[in-house]
Amino acid sequence: MFKGELKLPYILAIRSNHALWLPQDQEVVQQPWQKFERTFSNGTTEVRYRAEVVYGPRRKQYWLLTTDPETLPDNSTSFVMVCAPAVKLGEIGDSYGFRTWIEYGLKQAKDSLGWADFRMTRYEQIEKWWEMVMSAFLMVSLFADAFNEACPLAHGQFAQHPWWNNQSGWKHLLNNLRLIIQPLICFNWLKRWLQVFPIASLEAGFEQLTDQMNLFVCPLVHQFNLQLIFSSQ
């Protein structure tokens, strides 16, 4: 279903060779370049340039956004189609800039968490898999330093694990959270065998270990009721 049918506002990048069928008496016109300030998430700004491209009568807005109107460098030039009445002219560049953060999140979900690694054919099951992946992405993101300046992920004894990664970055957070949930995963692998060969000391040891892992909390995660809770169920 097209965005137009859903009546959703959008700012969408399209190919630079995009074209529309126009009557012979209509033409494509590029308006003069205008300067604008691109504001980044850290508050810094940078001068950018925009030019409207009009296909015949102005139906939708098409804009060229670039850092250099003379050379139009590939890595910093975008051709966008705008259908978002609430977005003001001066906000188009910043609004389109959100695409970088959206793609960053999707890249982590696809590459690190296996967005496309489902083995199901029914859409309902695939959708459930996507929900699980995005829930995991949310859990990792909530541990980001920006959200937890007073509660870094490297908690005391946990950071003594030989595989613990003290570097910043999404993948390093994912690595450390995987270490935190390992006891639960490993115990569930062994639990069925403990029903065949009962070893009380092994089961008690895992219970003690998971009790220790339950001490790993973070204020923001606790606030969202996402504290990691281990059980033998």
Image: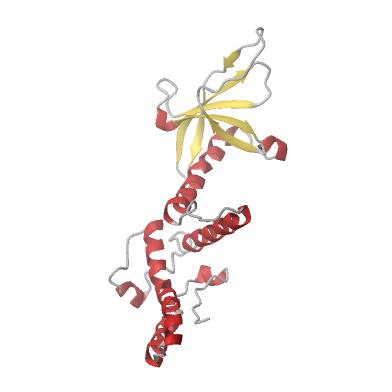
Residue drawn at point x = 44 percent, y = 84 percent: 211
Residue drawn at point x = 41 percent, y = 57 percent: 170
Nearest to the observer: residue 143 or residue 90: 143
**In screen coordinates, is 197 left or right of 88?**
left
Q: Quadrant of residue 197?
A: bottom left
Residue drawn at point x = 59 percent, y = 26 percent: 62
Q: As displayed, is residue 181 above or below residue 75? A: below
**In screen coordinates, is 30 left or right of 9?**
left
Nearest to the observer: residue 48 or residue 129: 129
Residue lying at the far left in this picture: please name it.
162
Q: Quadrant of residue 8?
A: top right
Residue lying at the far front in this picture: please name it.
196
Where residue 59 sits in the image (x, y, percent)? 68, 23
Q: How is the image coloured?
A: secondary structure
Residue drawn at point x = 59 percent, y = 15 percent: 28
Visible in this render: residue 4?
Answer: yes
Residue lying at the far top in this picture: please name it.
25
Q: As displayed, is residue 187 above or below residue 89? A: below
Where residue 4 sits in the image (x, y, percent)? 69, 35
The total of numbered circles placed on residues is 0
Visible in this render: residue 42?
Answer: no
Split into 4 quadrants, where in the image is the N terminus?
top right
Nearest to the observer: residue 96 or residue 134: 134
Q: Quadrant of residue 171?
A: bottom left
Where residue 118 sits in the image (x, y, percent)? 51, 55
